[in-house]
Amino acid sequence: MEHPNSEHGLRSYLIGFVLAVVLTAIPFYVVITHALPPGRTLLVIGIAAVLQILVHLRFFLHLNFTSTPKENLLAIVFTAVLIFIMVGGSFWIMFDLHQRMAI
């Protein structure tokens, strides 16, 4: 017996897959062809990564702001903030140490 929303689910997965492939191909193309300067290339990679996360949350994990319980969204936001603080703080420390050691 087929689930009544199986076609909708398959369509959602296919849209998510196509978006994920495109958001992966764009940074690869920019890096391989040297189409942009290094600073802008990093910006494109960062934007594509954030969009990739949003695509995965929406199309594969089926999280959205209307049907997902607020507790789950708050947990995701809290996790994202913690990861941002840890990764950002690590980069800040590494760049600061690099600058101090280079003098």
Image (tube, rainbow, N blue to C red):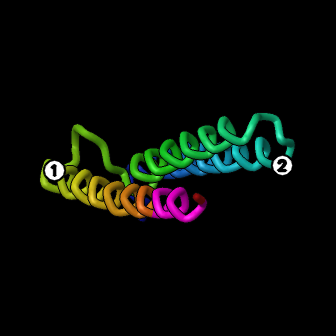
- Above or below residue 49? Residue 90 is below
In the depicted view, which residue is nearer to us: 54 or 93? 93
Asked whether 96 falls inside the magenta stretch, the response is yes
Q: Residues within 10 Å of mark 2 (few under 14, many from 20)?
A: few
| Residue farthest right in this picture | 33
The residue under label 2 is 32
Q: Residue at x 43, y 60 (%)?
A: 2
- Residue type, mark 1 in image: Pro
Left or right of 31 on screen, residue 4? left
What residue did someone put label 1 on? Answer: 69
**Quarter in which the N terminus is drawn:** bottom left
- Taking 8 as reference, is 15 left or right? right
Residue 86: where, in percent of width, then height? 34, 63
Say which amino acid is labelled 2.
Ile
Residue 56: percent from left, percent from top: 46, 52
- Residue sitting at the far left: 71
User: Would residue 85 be visible to someone looking at this image?
Assistant: yes
Q: Say which of marks 2 and 1 sits in front.
A: 2
Please give the range of residues in magenta: 94-102
| Residue 7 visible, this angle | no
The numbered mark, 2 or 1, whose residue comes first in the sequence reads 2
Residue 46 highlighted magenta (yes or no):
no
Where is residue 72, by image quadrant? bottom left
